[in-house]
Image: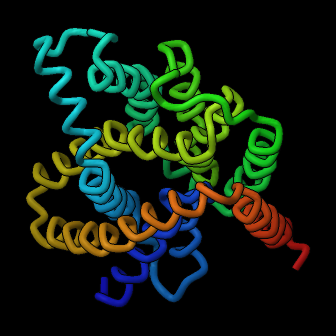
Amino acid sequence: MTTTQLISLGLVQGLTEFLPVSSSGHLILFGKFGAFADQGIGVDIALHIGSLVAVLIYFHKIIAEMFKGLWQKYFLPNFKNAGNRLAYLLLVASLPALFVGFFLRNYGMESFRNPKLIGWTILLYGLLLWVADKYGQNKRNMKQLNVLDAFFIGCAQCLALIPGTSRSGITITMARFLGVSRAEAAKFSMLLSVPTIFAAGVLEGWRLFCRGDTAQILLAADAAFYSFIFSFAVIFLMLKWLQRWSYLPFVVYRVILGMALLMYAYGIF
């Protein structure tokens, strides 16, 4: 795999992980329609690890508050402490996808990597995002979420295991249906990426280590580095955008891309 391909993949991942357009779907399409061979799930996960590091650095103050709140109560729940409360809400929201993701990772996720399925998920979940963003209220922030809200968002995140759905897109959609403001929904979605991506990264990293494939490990590290650079920039720009505007441009993009993929998949052009 060349440096050009790694930088291109890092750019695709960075631009799409935190925008509600599906990073996994774009990475698969990049491999199928680009000039390079499909990079596979292992490199895809390494690219997501780069995005994870970007989240950890960008939200380091919030993450530090969570660890401080957990440490004060010896990692036991204490919802009177804002950091502890947010940490446990993220844990609750992470559990459904961690469970379902582990099952699917060992039982045939490769079958999901096809343009027809991605076309439908990009189109339909893009339209669902439009409905949620248009009719969802802007009266709540992360501090006002409860355990049931977190569970609903976590269940929605399970759908993102199907390429094209968009992890950020579907969790933002659910948060908007629950009345969370645009920027706060995006922040919660970004923070929610931490445990899910970390778990996937540990699992894939362990498999690479067990295989003793040094070249693949170094390749994954390079992919993660380029992804980190572009992901950090997108987090900053995305949150600035949502302070003034809506998700409509991303919905339009998803509808156009989804229809184009379906026309290709069904042989219309």
Left or right relative to 108: residue 120: right
- Which quarter of the picture shows residue 260? bottom right
Q: Quadrant of residue 76?
A: top left
Residue 110 image offset from top left, x and y in percent: 50, 52
- Quarter of the image for the C terminus: give it: bottom right
Find residue 20 and report its horizontal and vertical position in percent. Answer: 61, 55
Residue drawn 41% across the image and 20% down it: 92
Q: In the image, residue 66 lies at what x, y percent?
A: 24, 30
Task: Tell me the residue at 40%/70% (across/down).
Answer: 233
Q: Position of residue 227 (x, y in %)?
A: 34, 69
Q: Quadrant of the N terminus?
A: bottom left
Side (left or right) of 110 relative to 134: left
In this picture, is 78 found above or below 191? Answer: above
92 relative to 213, above or below: above
For the residue pair 246 and 124, the one nearer the viewer reads as 246
Q: Look at 18% across and 55% down and name the residue there.
A: 208
Q: Against 22, is 70 above or below?
A: above
Tell me which colouring the rendered structure shows: rainbow
The answer to whether 99 is drawn above or below residue 116 in the figure is: above
